[in-house]
Image (spheres, rainbow, N blue to C red):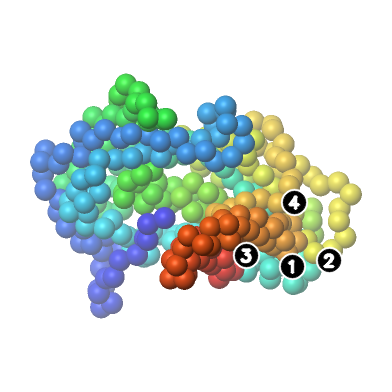
Amino acid sequence: MLSTWVLLPRSTALHPQQQLAQAFPISPSPKSSQLSSERAAVIPLFKGGDTLDPNCYRPISILPCLSKPSQQADYRPFRISPYLLCYAIWFQSWSWVLNDILTAIDKTHYCAAVFIDLAKAFDSVNHHILIGRLDSLGFSNDCLAWFTNYFSDRVQCVKSEGLLSGPLAVSMGVPQGSILGPTLFSVYINDVGLAAGESLIHLYADDTILHTFGPSLDTVLTTLQASFNAIQLSFRGLQLLLNTSKTKCILFNRSLPAPTRLSNITTLDGSDLEYVDNYKYLGVWLDCKLSFQTHIKHLQSKVKSRICFLFRNKASFTHAAKHTLVKLTILPILDFGDVI
């Protein structure tokens, strides 16, 4: 996800909204921007599951080649000071979340978490609500006009297996393949964390963890349920829908006695969330004991296939080429998430 930091003078005593307004150069007149006429080619990226189920694909918008340089030139890298995202701690490194969970386990506390999945989150962004959020952050009228133009008259088509569908107008959402998209979505959901109540929350684009801990399991689950209800209402206010089938619960516990029956965490519609022992979050498999055994097994499988490829084709590569292939195809797998 795009960084949400920008260097501002330390000596400034301006209100955060004034800082934000000054952090952005005034864009050219919206009428001069050609971004509104962009046509995005949507590539369905398979996420896993049933290949015939459209819900198992993530739509990635491939924008025209000149789109990203144009966005950079018009608005410079869209970066926001941590002081301007009022609750930027919710967007911090998720290793802090693991530290919280490990601390709870070390204290022999129960720790329960809900991994919230939103259905087509980026495609559900309401432009009017987003413009209102930008307005509340202190954007000038020129900036708001620029964004209004950016969202207007956009079209997209689907590209799959070399075929291209006919164009359709896009009246809502932010393109996932754009420079501005991820940060705009973060601004859109910035206030969701206010509803977490006594629970802790971590937001990373459309991936959300809601968790709480304590010595009493009943109290932990009651607190988590109350926070989850409030979070759902907050998402509904943003017209973001919960994907109940992919929203899961985990009870993290190493040494405490396992409960014979867990109280269900339910959605506002009355559906019970499923408790799982493993969940893949931001590319890392978490298990209920935080042993990372499941994650290690997946790493072994990925690395093994690449090592076998190199072994079978070792005669075809020079020593330098082998070294490069290892650096490019194997080390990134091992390095990903190693800071946790």
Q: Which residue is mark 4?
A: 277
Q: Give the secondary structure at mark 1.
A: helix
3 or 4: tag closer to the N-terminus = 3
Residue type, mark 1 in image: Ile
User: CB under 8 Å between callouts 3 and 4?
Assistant: no
Instruction: Please report contact status of discs 2 and 1: CB closer than 8 Å, yes or no.
Output: yes
The image quadrant that residue 94 belongs to is: bottom right
In the rendered image, which residue does mark 3 sit on?
A: 98
Numbered tag placed on residue 73 in the rendering: none
In depth, the one of 125 and 232 nearer the eye is 125
Q: Residue at x 79, y 45 (%)?
A: 263
| Pointer 1 or 4: first along the chain | 1
The residue positioned 69% from the left and 68% from the top of the image is: 102
How far is disc 1 from disc 3 in space, using C-alphas?
A: 10 Å
Residue identified by numbered label 1: 105
In three-dimensional space, the C-alpha distance between marks 3 and 4, rounded to whole angstroms, equals 16 Å
Q: Amino acid at mark 3?
A: Leu
Tell me residue 101's x, y (percent).
67, 64
**CA gap, disc 2 and disc 4:** 15 Å
Counting from the top left corner in percent of width and height, residue 186 is at 41, 51
Give the vertical position of 26 relative to 323 (above or below): above
Q: Nearer the viewer, mark 2 or mark 4?
A: 4
Q: Which residue is depicted at the point 74% across and 51% down?
A: 277
Which quadrant holds the C terminus? bottom right
Q: Secondary structure at mark 2?
A: loop
Counting residues from the N terminus, which is met first, the one under dot 1 or under dot 3? 3
Which of pointers 2 and 1 lies earlier in the amino acid sequence? 1
Query: Given the image, on which type of amino acid does mark 2 rest?
Result: Ser
Task: Provide the residue designation for mark 2.
Answer: 255
